[in-house]
Image (cartoon, rainbow, N blue to C red):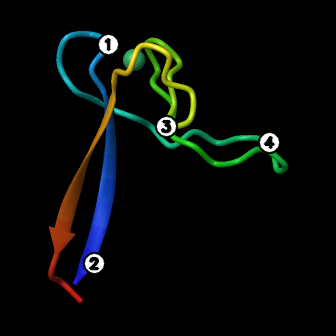
Amino acid sequence: MTVTRKWYCTCSGKPLELANVETMEDEPDEPTCQLCGATQSSDPRHTIIFKDKEEWDD
Ligand SMILES: [Zn+2]
């Protein structure tokens, strides 16, 4: 079983899944809200939430 953690931002009033953005090589690969720019570690308005999705395919 694999658990995939999906990150969302609720800044627009409903959960918006964060997109994994392509970053510079030295930058950490962190999903970022495309609307407000919040990330898991930079969440000043506390809009970041996550849901764990269980996958049983393997
Ligand atoms: Zn946001």
Cβ atoms at labels 3 and 4 below 8 Å apart = no
- Look at label 4 and name its amino acid: Met
**What residue lies at 34% left-to-right and 21% top-to-bottom?**
47
Element type where label 4 sits in the image:
loop
Residue 55 position by quadrant: bottom left
Question: Nearer the observer, disc 4 or disc 2?
Answer: 2
Q: Mark 1 = which residue?
A: 11
Q: Mark 2 = which residue?
A: 2
Q: Which of marks 4 and 1 is nearer the N terminus?
A: 1
> Marks 2 and 1, Cα distance to the nearest angstrom?
28 Å
> Marks 4 and 2, Cα distance to the nearest angstrom?
28 Å
Q: Mark 3 = which residue?
A: 40
- Look at label 3 and name its amino acid: Gln
Element type where label 3 sits in the image:
loop
**What residue lies at 53% left-to-right and 18% top-to-bottom?**
37
> Marks 3 and 2, Cα distance to the nearest angstrom?
21 Å
Residue 24's disc is 4
